[in-house]
Amino acid sequence: MSKNLQTFVLAGGCFWCLDAAYRALDGVESVVSGYTGGSVDAPSYELVCTGRTGHAEAVKVTFDADVIPADTILDAYFTMHDPRQLDHQGADTGTQYRSAMFFADDAQKALFEAARDRAADTWDAPIGRVEGTVVTTIEPAGTWWDAEDYHQDFFTKNPGQGYCLAVAVPKVNKVRAAFSQYVKVA
């Protein structure tokens, strides 16, 4: 039985949170944390954290679209982070934590634009409040750099880590609640 595999590259704050939330969903085949959208070759985590590389912490999510629809993957993305926060998520500040979607082709770009429009219906503030506007950028995919091994599946490897407990757990729980029909059964 062949699979209908698709891959999206998405950034929305620290990649540990996106990684953990996507791994909870049935049909997600793999999640790789990494860096993209910048100008430095083979960046390290330490260098990306300076905010001087232009790279975003991102995840490359590969999923079977026959099991979980592409729109669900994208709607989950807009559930697990606040797309109104420019260049930060919570206390994580800098362009490396921006809300961005990196498209591979025109069809993917159209899917991303539609998802951002759906998110705007949920997230946008009343007219006249600029700070409430969805600021997620849709950028052409560039070179992808895998993050260091210790960042891969970080939440599973470090469930008691403070950041995971304080930040990742609420995001994972929010996605599990909103997309319960797609949550993996242990």
Image (spheres, helix red, strand yellow):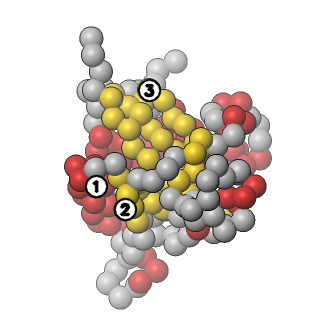
Q: Secondary structure at mark 3?
A: strand
Residue 26 position within the rendered picture, expressed as x and y whole percent measured from the top left: 41, 27
The extreme bottom residue here reads: 128
Q: Earlier in the sequence, mark 2 or mark 3?
A: 3
Residue ID for mark 1: 109
Q: Earlier in the sequence, mark 1 or mark 3?
A: 3
State the residue lying farthest toward the top: 1
Q: Which mark is residue 138?
A: 2
State if disc 2 and disc 1 touch (CB < 8 Å).
yes
Quick check: can you spot residue 96?
A: no
What type is the residue that disc 2 sits on? Answer: Ile
Q: CA distance from mark 1 to mark 2?
A: 7 Å
Q: Choose top left, top right, bottom left or bottom right for residue 100.
A: bottom left
Nearest the eye: 168 or 86: 86
Which of pointers 1 and 2 lies earlier in the amino acid sequence? 1
Residue at label 3? 29
Mark whose residue sits in front, 1 or 3? 1
Which amino acid type is marked by label 3?
Glu
Q: Secondary structure at mark 1?
A: helix
Q: Which mark is residue 132?
A: none
Q: Position of residue 15 (x, y in %)?
A: 59, 48
